[in-house]
Amino acid sequence: MSVVTETSLRCDLLVAGGGMAGVCCAIAAARLGSRVILVQDRPVLGGNASSEIRMHIVGATGLHAGLPLRLEPREGGLIEEIRLELAVRNPQRSPAVFDLILYEFCRAEPNLTLLLNTTVVVARVEAGRIAEVTAERPSTEDRFRIAADMFADCTGDGRLGAEAGVPAMRGREGRDAFGEPLAPAAGDTKTLGSTILFQARKHDRPMPFVAPPWVRRFTAADFKLRPFGKSGADLGLEYGYWWIEWGGCLDSIKDGERIRDELLGITLGVWNHIKNESGLDVAHWALDWIGFVPGKRESRRFVGQHVLTENDLFSSRAFPDAIAFGGWPIDTHPPEGVDAPAEPPCTQHHLPWLYDVPLRSCVASNRRNLFFAGRNLSATHLAFASTRVMATCAAIGQGVGTAAALALRAGTEPAAIAADPALLARIRQRLLRDDAYLLGCRNEDPDDLARRAEVTASSAQRGGEAIQVVSGQTRSVHGSGETGPTPAGNQWENVLRELETGRARAPHLRATGPRLPGLAPLAQRSRRRPARPPRAAVAGARGGRRAPNRVRHGPASFPHAVAGGWLHRADGVGPAAARDRARLPDRGGDRRRLAPCAHRDGQLPAPARAPAAGAARRRRGPADHRLGNERSRPRADLRGAGLQLKPAAPCASVAGFHFRMPPENLPPELAAAFPAAGRIVAAQPFGHGHINRTFVLTAEGGTRFVLQQINGRVFRRVPELMENIHRVTTHLRAKSPRGLELVPARDGAVFVRDAAGEAWRLYRFIVGAHTVEQATDPAQARETARAFGAFQAQLADLPGGRLHETILDFHHTRRRFDAFAAAVAADPCNRAAAVRAEIAFAVAREADADRLLGLLARGEIRERITHNDTKLNNVMLDDATGRGVAVVDLDTVMPGLSLYDFGDMVRTSVAAAAEDEPDPARVEVRLPFFRALVEGYLETAGGMLNAAERAHLAFAGRLLAYEQGLRFLTDYLQGDTYYRIHRPAQNLDRARAQFALVRGLETQEVALGRIVAEIQGSP
Ligand SMILES: Cc1cc2nc3c(=O)[nH]c(=O)nc-3n(C[C@H](O)[C@H](O)[C@H](O)COP(=O)(O)OP(=O)(O)OC[C@H]3O[C@@H](n4cnc5c(N)ncnc54)[C@H](O)[C@@H]3O)c2cc1C
């Protein structure tokens, strides 16, 4: 009978492999509430960084990288938290203390079960999913059968995936396999080699070294390209040499024992040469440690849902499912290692920009519930040569752990995440909240109080404004590659400009509220500790344009009173009790006393920012950093920057409410201002809009309302805007009772201002209807067009004169063309020469810019009331029938041309490709969608349109695409100052995609005309 004890375990996520990828994956998922088992086959964590191997962690901070990249690419999130902890608690760089700290990190997580000395050896697959793995721990004669909903292979060697039958790549792919220019003409099975490091110590007397007979013998010629320093200078003897590399021509898994033996001989041979033959002054140096576990650079790489390639890296291809970024150069080594002394030990192909790592490269292609992270990522040999560094692996691990935890909650399998944009958005927002950085991904978390904070610094440079620390975009990473070394910053100004013109759906940035009292002393404390490097202390506000390390002590302002007169506890305890608990008066008096839990939600969170604070967080216990308790905390990056954060309101009096967001963020005076709403018992943030703040309020009895704070930065003339909306909604409701209905304030006004001067309006909630984000079939396009057509037609007889023009010249194509021509003439970035073809395309169509304006001037078409934001999700569809019942988001309703609205529908729904599709050939005109739009639009607006308008339906789509293309190209020529970009030449890609649509619509002109004619002719 076997002495082995068999135990069955179950968890949500099993992580195999405790290197940096596996550790970060497991911790991220555990902190988000998943029950995680981390299985590591060795006694310590850290993989190649552990005391057994001793590689040091690097990441996107690639040496000698292009200048824009050099600025601020350091990873945030868990790896930063670990590095900061190490900086404080292991300045001596003890490898054993490194192990210990990783061990502590894992032990601190109550949701994480750590199985050390345990190896995953079998995976059982059922119906395309891994059902269970077997893991063995020989030292205790244990065998575990571990069932899980999801699995993550972070073993480096890919044992779990291999056992589960996931296809893998090995060696170097040939050039044709993925079209990679740096790849060899023909593929082979050779990999990067392995390495054994050594460490030596200087003694106070000469220390001999007698080489055993089995060491390799070297001569000085072998080290021409592998120097080990000069006498008197740093010889690197305390660290060893990464270039002691060998085994890339063998199988790094199956030949592992042979590789170790050979590497021991090589490493000792190098030491022998240094010590006994080089003539260097090393007599007092003696070997202290030599590794027995070779550091393995490369083994299996899996085939996932996407294989990341050299081209993805060089072009910084934007992936909507990016969960991490990289930036280390494509760092290739000769597989022969030290056996190729005439070849440099590495060749580093520097990347121009940071790049996205998509989640799909971390999801198995043929197993529905298997992720990978770290070395066995789905990447070609060349892409892997960059992603393999440990901070990048760790960032990917955190991305995978976060994705796993949120997918588990959503009941979505790993294989299906990429097809779920809402889930992806939640994952990415969560990563930002947890201090990860994602290229171009803005913090849009409606529950993040920090977004409504005012952030100031005593001074800041252009492009490095203090408010950026809450934007999610805290680094300057993408610059202008063509125009020289100056990075373009993270385009913050563009966001502000977009906000001002109303085009952007950007975060609400500024709100005022009570000052957090703990912040200034903390910041002062950090100032008193100059020894801490600013980079380490300012995890998210780092960079070349860092704000100075000073705190501004301005007057405290408390415009949002804490106690709510409107919001009542669900258990019947009224506002007075809530007020008492919060110990804050309704108005006046001393409002500086903050509620008890302000420190939890409003305070800087402990992890990651200051190492000691990280330790403190773990001492406080797990509950502090699990989801739910940290939802509203602001990012912590502000402390060391000397920045000032004012959260909108403390949260004490919310205890007992079922609110996702502290209801006291709603100014209490609103309760009195909107008496018609009655007694409100619940308030929840609502929707994904980025301009206005929106809440759903539930009154006693269940009636719901939509409360919106109108963004005064975007809409500066609120009275005019609201007058438009009031007139329009009143008129529409007389014709269609399910339309939007404003709830008047006590004095009959259609909006009120709170004590801070912010404008608020209240709508009745439209029940039994929903919105859709993207048209996936023509029927949805038809409904959208039908609803917008009805909207225009029903407003054709609006009494009371012309509406206010809230945004001037919104679609004035002549003015757009003139702006483009001026940009070409000025050519401030010397880009015009390289885009001659696009300029010629635009110039050739200049006459189009005047066509509708000419019709209008001649009276052939007339001004109408238009919506001006005719995207799909501005139409509410009936839950039962799918028919459009109401058009919403009326902030841009104003005088315009009906054809602009129809043209924008065509522009946004007819091409399936993304707006920034880099390959214009993929921008195809989907005729069925065009047909559906015409059908829907004419069904409701047909009776209103005159012959000229009908005759220009197809042209309108072309014109709007042309106008948008002009705007993108103008911005590209001007140096990308208006539209935010996430990669170089993105605006050029956008312009090309729009022009490709123009070309497609031109090519299809006859077919489009025929469709319009057919539909007009039909009954
Ligand atoms: C010589 C060398 C020098 C390098 N230099 C650097 C450098 O300077 N900086 C840098 O950042 N990166 C460097 N790298 C790259 C980097 O170390 C690796 O790419 C990185 O360690 C990958 O991390 P990982 O978590 O995916 O895998 P690993 O670090 O390999 O960790 C995987 C872990 O899984 C465990 N495991 C394997 N199989 C099983 C199983 N079946 N069950 C349970 N556990 C298992 C392993 O024991 C290991 O601990 C270097 C690599 C080498 C080899």
Image (spheres, helix red, strand yellow):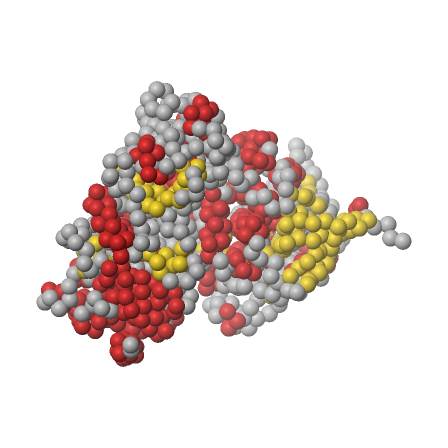
Report the residue that reaches farthest toward the left. 858
Q: Is residue 840 above or below residue 386?
A: below
Nearer the observer, 75 or 321: 321
From the viewer's perspective, tell me whether residue 960 is left or right of residue 116: left
From the viewer's perspective, tell me whether residue 118 is left or right of residue 655: right
Q: Residue at x 24, y 59 (%)?
A: 794
Q: How many marks?
A: 0
Nearer the observer, 942 or 227: 942
Q: Residue at x 36, y 28 (%)?
A: 561
Q: Quadrant of the C terminus?
A: bottom left
Nearer the observer, 243 or 291: 291
Residue 915 at x, y percent in the picture: 35, 62
Do we see residue 978 in this rendering?
A: no
Q: Is residue 829 above or below residue 58?
A: below
Residue 1017 at x, y percent in the picture: 26, 78
Residue 460 at x, y percent in the picture: 32, 37
Q: Quadrant of residue 528?
A: top left
Do we see residue 209 in this rendering?
A: yes
Report the residue that reaches farthest toward the top. 589
Q: Residue at x 64, y 43 (%)?
A: 112
Q: Residue at x 37, y 51 (%)?
A: 766
Residue 245 at x, y percent in the picture: 62, 56
Q: Is residue 723 above or below residue 953?
A: above
Nearer the observer, 19 or 754: 754
Report the residue that reaches farthest toward the right. 1
